[in-house]
Amino acid sequence: MRPQNFQKILLIKSHSLGVGDILRSSAAWLALKEKFPQAELHLLFLSKHAGYPSEDFIREHSLLKSAHFVTIREADPSHPKAKRVPWRVVKAQVQRISAELEPDLVIDFEASGLRTSLVTRWASQVSRAKTIGIAQFPGRGWFYDTSAPSTHAYLKAHGLTQPMDYTERDFVVLAALGIEREGRAIHLQLTKAGALYKEQLMPKLIPGRRVVGLNIGCGTADALPKRPALAVVVDAIHLLAEAVPSQLLLTGAKFEKSINQEFIQLYEEKYGNSLPMVDTAGEPSLSALTGVIDVCDLFVSSDSGPYHMAVAQRKPTIAWFILPEPSSYHNETWCRCLIKPQAADVLAAAHVLLDVSTKANEPNLNSVA
């Protein structure tokens, strides 16, 4: 596609609305803003059901002008008899949104299926926008004005292999615009809600001590296998506290407060109460959580949403994996992904990250000093 001064770009996405999954797209949003600084970015997401907490959070993202969520099922998708919303209803919603936004470019980021291809076509019919998609299989390119090569071709051209980095996936379609990832990381700024929560949090912190954030997380039934063993987490945090005077900020959803309290009890039984701790589980919204992360000098997390948020905020981050998950790693200088680490491994990673951050003059180090 020849370069144009696009003013409004509609981004079509589907599949998971998990915090990490949707935030992984922000590197592509950043690349688009750099390519078309004058353009507004508008997200249209096909959601399995209404009410995901990440909806309000993503609407506040600094790179997006707006975000819209079109529900494709009438009930929770876990319900075995959840009915699909009739396609005529979905089409009407898509075309209403497109008529209101009047985009001049519609990009379908999904490589598989025809659902988002149809949505892209419906949006362009109303707005007369140019369209871009991925020619993943013969005939799919018919839906778009311009097509990027298939994922397989992209991997081959870039010397990459499967499983594909989740962040990289959104750059397959952007190849049609001549946009390369070029090492871009995911992106998230402190939100207004985050700044307010941070202001409330500061009086609870002790000046002169480093702030270590801990997200044990993985509280849903399907995520429990990703949760690290509490005894090892306790030992790792203790080693950190011994190495550098610290205080601990625990995060998590409301239903994860019990695991945080279990951690605190186990820690105090083994090491006493010398480590100051504040448990924020269930208090901040996802948006306000940006304020919790912002005050941390180091953030330790399981493979869950807050891990990706911390990386996106360029916070020194240790991601604690139970099994290898290459597609979920962030290969940034401020992140270390550890697979089933021992306490000493966590301490070693922390020393490297904090040293790197000090050399880089990160403004948040010793933020409560």
Image: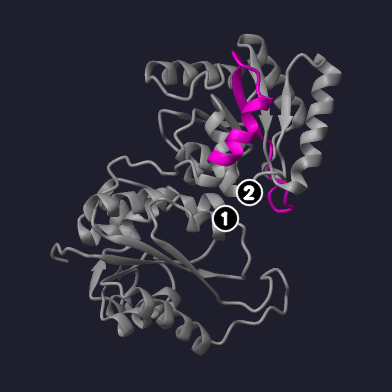
| Residue toward you, 156 or 302 | 302
At 46% across and 40% down in the image, what residue appears?
A: 312
322 versus 54 height, above or below: above
At 49% across and 28% down in the image, what residue appears?
A: 316
Which secondary structure lies at badge 1? loop
Across and down, in percent, residue 1 comes to 17, 66
Across and down, in percent, residue 269 comes to 86, 20
Residue under pointer 2 = 285
Q: Quadrant of residue 10?
A: bottom left
Q: Quadrant of the C terminus?
A: top right
Please, which residue is most extreme toward the bottom here?
88
> Which mark sits nearer the N-terminus, 1 or 2?
1
Residue under pointer 1 = 18
Mark carried by residue 79: none
Q: Which residues are magenta?
A: 195-223
Query: Would residue 312 be found to the left or right of residue 350 on screen?
Result: left
